[in-house]
């Protein structure tokens, strides 16, 4: 699975959009970009994933560059409850020893401030 | 909603004890995973299972074993607990599409914080 690079930490004002970047320059054609977050003392929570098109759900939007070497997770109106560690993970399909396991890096600690 | 439950939130055991951590999911998922999380090291995969009675070693299986007798339940066993196994243990489950080989998102339990003294 491709390696990802994220900033260690970011701040965001409550009510503003939070834009979390991720670099994955070695991503291969069949690998997906996943985002998870972990609020303190809880298990990680799935947010969104995509292959090459931009994606949006009730939690966030995912923007993937055309060359797929980087992506941005957007929380459109951050709240204090969005304070968490955000993980960007690149993962291929099932099979050949890649049975769905996730490789978590250090992630980005997002602090939403009032 | 998918629910993954773990038998305990907090557990304190003594060195040398046999420890069982239980995980149950209610979404009929094929895949189940055990991770441990330590400060500065992130989440690391211990074992995973993609079917009943099937198991595969993850990145750090030493000192652990697993059991999956039923599809909904995946147990992590510490045969003889040691202090370096003090950690947060997280269980997860997911399904996958055999046609496209696409593995769907993982759902995590709340975690068990194990302290071995």
Image (tube, rainbow, N blue to C red):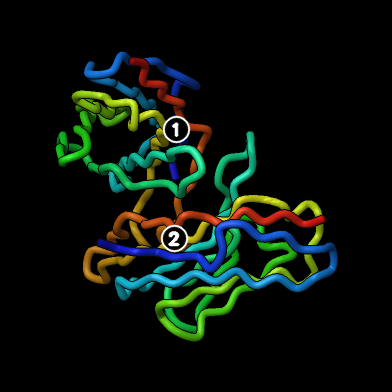
Lateral position of residue B96 relative to residue A7, left or right: left
Residue B102 x/y as whole percent: 28, 60
Q: Name the disc covering residue B92, or none.
A: 2
The answer to which of B110 and A107 lies nearer the viewer is B110
Give the quarter of the figure containing the C terminus of chain A.
top left
Q: Is residue B4 above or below residue B87?
A: below
Q: Residues within 10 Å of mark 1 (few under 14, many from 20)?
A: many
Specify few, some or many for label 2: CA neighbours under 10 Å numbering under 14, 14-19, or 20 or more: many
Q: CA distance from mark 1 to mark 2?
A: 18 Å
The percent coordinates of residue A42 (x first, y second) are 46, 46
Q: Position of residue B51 (x, y in %)?
A: 42, 78
Please indicate whether residue B98 sits to the left or right of residue A111 in the image: left
Q: Residue at x 75, y 73 (%)?
A: B18
Q: Measured along the vertical axis of the image, is residue B64 above or below residue A44? A: below
> On what subunit does the disc labeled 2 rest?
B
Tell me whether marks 1 and 2 sit on the same chain.
no
Residue placed at 43% from the left, 38% from the top? A39
Q: Does the rendering let one see residue A4?
A: yes
Dividing the picture into quadrants, the one containing residue A71 is top left
Label annotation for residue A85: 1
Which chain is home to disc 1? A
* Residue A25 seen in the figure: no
How many discs mark residues in the rendered view?
A: 2
Q: Residue at x 25, y 67 (%)?
A: B97
Q: Image quarter for residue B83?
A: bottom right
Q: Residue at x 23, y 42 (%)?
A: A50
């Amino acid at each position: 699975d491709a390696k990802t690079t994220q900033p260690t930490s970011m701040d965001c004002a409550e009510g503003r959009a939070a834009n979390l970047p991720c670099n994955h320059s070695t991503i291969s054609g069949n690998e997906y970009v996943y985002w998870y977050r972990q609020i303190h003392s809880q298990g990680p929570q799935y947010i969104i994933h995509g292959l090459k098109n931009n994606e949006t759900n009730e939690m966030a939007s995912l923007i993937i560059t055309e060359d797929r070497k980087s992506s941005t997770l957007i929380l459109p109106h951050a709240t204090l409850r969005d304070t968490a560690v955000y993980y960007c993970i690149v993962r291929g399909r099932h099979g050949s020893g890649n049975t769905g396991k996730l490789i978590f890096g250090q992630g980005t600690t997002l602090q939403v401030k009032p | 909603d998918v629910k993954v439950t773990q038998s305990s939130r907090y557990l304190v055991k003594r060195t040398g004890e046999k420890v069982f951590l239980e995980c149950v999911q209610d979404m009929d998922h094929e895949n189940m995973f055990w991770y441990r999380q330590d400060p500065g090291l992130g989440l690391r995969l211990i074992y995973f299972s993609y079917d009943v009675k099937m198991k595969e070693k993850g990145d750090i299986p030493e000192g652990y074993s697993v059991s999956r007798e039923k599809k909904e339940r995946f147990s992590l066993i510490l045969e003889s607990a040691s202090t370096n196994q003090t950690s947060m243990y997280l269980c997860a489950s997911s399904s996958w599409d055999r046609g496209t080989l696409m593995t769907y998102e993982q759902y995590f339990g709340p975690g068990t914080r194990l302290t071995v003294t």
